[in-house]
Amino acid sequence: MSVGTSNAPGGRGTGRVPAPRHGDLTGLGIDPDELPDGLVIADEHGLVVCFNAAAARITATAPADALGRRLEKALPLEDLEGRRWWQLTDPYGGLAIRVGQPERNLLLPGGREVLVSARYVRAEPTGPVRRVVVSLRDTEARRRTERSHAELIATVAHELRSPLTSVKGFTATLLAKWERFTDDQKRLMLETVDADADRVTRLIAELLDISRIDSGRLEVRRQPVDIGAAVGRHIQAYVAAGQPADRFLLRVEQPLPALWADPDKVDQVLSNLIENAVRHGEGTVTIDITATASPREGEDVGTSVTVSDEGPGIPEESMNRVFTRFWRGSKRGGTGLGLYIVKGIVEAHGGTITVGRAPSGGAEFRFTLPVSAPAYLA
């Protein structure tokens, strides 16, 4: 903890500011500069005796310029209405039963927002304040989270509007004029309603997945998974839907380790990656399944799946944003949430996923899962 020298207010003389006795972190073997939040401590005279590295970073004030100064001078704060915070709260002369200030947004000089909370330390419940301990937090991380939530709400609203408008329009038309339409026309309208309802269902499922990923509550129910057969089913579905069979190349390296994973979630990952290659790529979509080093410590072997195409690929400057929310590889629709969910699913399994350029020049996604065999099979 840094201790400074200064002239005490009111002609009290010059001398070393006494080191804090209450809440002294150095006595616990903790360096205040190691704390993630800003820490400012003022003594019973209102002089700053601790100003850690995080506080210096947040306030852009050097510790040497803050130590020994009056708290209100070293840390000038205003509320959002422009009132001086220390004059408003008066920690040393206010109510004797007050123990501190809850966290709130305040302004530093220049208008920068910072989250501030304070604790008043007294030797006895209603005695004089011996220490004012102030915690500072940068608001940038919170702002990013708020912006991300706002973007998610806007995206969901936009994506829901189109299918719900369609569903409402077709059902209202059918109810009002049922007898005027032929059976073929009715079937076409109902098929459209059914497809739009599926679209809404998929979007809601994506939102639930994002909620679970962000909160760390994505459950993985591990079962034996034949990854080669799972890829084969996806290829067969595309061929049945009209894609030429020779557009897909599946290569499985044998032997593969027995893979224990959540089959539904692995299907979700495969569906997204293959769909991206089909929709946004060109030429042959190649899926390679190989045994590889496990991403999990203590396991020797894992299973790796690589999906690549022969399209234009992903620009180098975009590769670090591929797995973030709302990233879209093209303007051909989609919420931009799929790859974010894919990454969350792979990591929930203890695996890794990367993106790069395929030998043919297209995009190449590679995810690796640990085999995760249950303990009773080890």
Image (tube, rainbow, N blue to C red):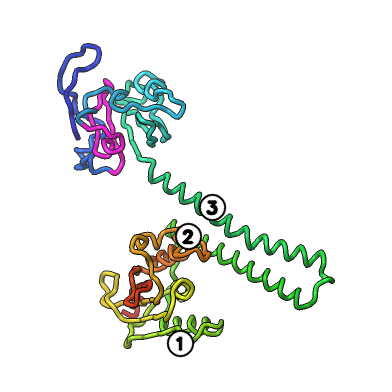
Q: Amino acid at mark 2?
A: Ile
291 and 179: which is toward the camera: 179
Q: Which residue is mark 3?
A: 153
Q: Mark 3 packing: few (<14 Cα in 10 Å), some, or many (20+)?
A: few
- Write the start and end of the magenta stretch as one range: 36-63
Q: Secondary structure at mark 1?
A: helix
182 and 339: which is toward the camera: 182
Answer yes or no: do the residues labelled 1 and 3 have beta carbons within 8 Å?
A: no
Question: Which quadrant does the N terminus fall into?
Answer: top left
Q: Mark 1 packing: few (<14 Cα in 10 Å), some, or many (20+)?
A: few
How far, Cα to Cα, is label 3 from label 2?
Answer: 12 Å
Q: Which residue is mark 2?
A: 210
Q: Amino acid at mark 1?
A: Asp
Which circle, 3 or 2, is nearer the viewer? 3
Q: Secondary structure at mark 3?
A: helix
Mark carried by residue 246: 1
N-terminal of the pair, mark 3 or mark 2, is: 3
- Which residue reaches farthest left? 15
Q: Amino acid at mark 3?
A: Ile
Answer yes or no: do the residues labelled 3 and 2 have beta carbons within 8 Å?
A: no
Quadrant of the image occupied by residue 196 = bottom right
Magenta region includes residue 48:
yes
